[in-house]
Image (cartoon, helix red, strand yellow):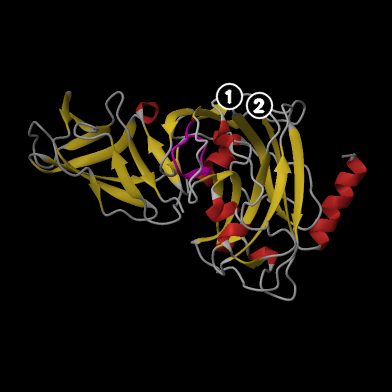
Amino acid sequence: MSKAAELANLIGNINAGGGGVNRNVIINGAMNVAQRGTSSTGIGGSSGYFTCDRWLIAQSGDGRLTMTQDSSVPTGKGFANSIKLDCTTADTSIAASEFLQIVQKIEGQNLQSIGKGTSDAKPITVSFYVKANAAFNFVCELNDLDNTRHISKLFSTTTDWVKHEITFPADTTGAFDNDNAASLNLTFWLHAGSTYSGGTLNTASFASTTNANRAAGVSSFYSSTDNNFFITGVQLEVGQNPTEFEHEPFERTLEKCQRYFFKWSVDATSLGAGIYYANNQVLGYHKYPRTMRASPTMANSGAGCIYAYTQGTFRTQDSGPVHDNIGTDSLRWNFNVSVNGTVGDGAYIQLPASQYIQGDAEL
């Protein structure tokens, strides 16, 4: 796209109520942040967040894959990372209810500029780069969760990076809720049984969701263990004109991701100060990296995941809880230690090597 065309598209989107800074509704579209890790193997049979933040692998069936944060990217576009999926177990006998999706769930309060469900509703443009080991037809879907409406478009892959720019028409039916719950899923379908692919792809306009029409015509990523799939540069913006991907500083993307998930590990050893409330009980306060979407579900690596350093001695967390009073901004450390201290003594709360504590407020 020429600079003149890019400027014209951006101005057009601004006039339509989009464009400008922060025009990309997608978080971590350049796949730069991967707090959970850069590789996960044996994924299959159930859904979850495995590597790159905010990107859900949703699936059901017998196929298995490896997901990695990869360094293969389109040249000259400013990207350093992509998501790569490798098929490790094929599934050529596709049951009706099977599916494989890459999904980003979007809060309703981040979608209000679209004006969906009003007479001023605006088109939505999705753009992204993909490649694969062969030619496939996959599906990009917008799924309105608040009003059970959707629209889908096919896109193709080659062995080289290809940019797709897909404009979805405005929908004057069904407004997005203005809250912190999931209102819209951006879904990439890579495999689907007849429950989701047995009808006719709904491409013309948003319509009441009919499962059979969501992924009709989709190829199967699980057709062979030779298969792979790469994606990066995902952008969703208001308006009918695709613009170049909006790159942002890494720390800004990380801040956005930490609204949904954070992980303290050996790379973030210090967890703050505390005090002995009882001989074997330490209390402390910790503020999250960012205010979270909702009070997170906390998890840790088990007994001994935390310790108190007092008077030159490490006192390791014993069995039992690690934290309580969990809110959207902070929590209270509350744990028993294996060796008693003195009530009123201060403590420096740390993580031992190879241990972790994490908070999850994903949609």
What amino acid type is highlighted by mark number 1?
A: Asp
Which residue is depicted at the point 62% across and 48% down?
26
Residue 346: image quadrant is top left
The residue nearer to you, when weighing 5 against 309, is 5
Side of 164 where 211 appears, left or right: left
Residue farthest along the front direction in this orientation: 93
Residue 129: image quadrant is top right
What amino acid type is highlighted by mark number 2?
A: Asn
Q: Residues within 10 Å of mark 1 (few under 14, many from 20)?
A: some
Q: Secondary structure at mark 1?
A: loop
**Whether residue 289 is visible:** no
**Closer to the N terminus: mark 2 or mark 1?**
2
Residue under pointer 1: 226
Q: Are marks 2 and 1 in contact (CB under 8 Å)?
A: yes
Per the rendered image, the range of residues in magenta is 51-65
Q: Which mark is residue 133?
A: 2
> Considering only vertical position in the picture, is 220 above or below 179?
above
Q: Secondary structure at mark 2?
A: loop
Q: Residues within 10 Å of mark 2 (few under 14, many from 20)?
A: some
Where residue 250 appears, as percent x and y from the top left, is: 59, 35
**Whether residue 266 is visible:** yes
Which residue is depicted at the point 85% across and 57% down?
12
> Considering only vertical position in the picture, is 173 above or below 220?
below
Where residue 154 appears, as percent x and y from the top left, is: 71, 48
**Is residue 57 on the magenta stretch?**
yes
The residue nearer to you, when weighing 310 against 18, is 18
**Is residue 30 on the magenta stretch?**
no
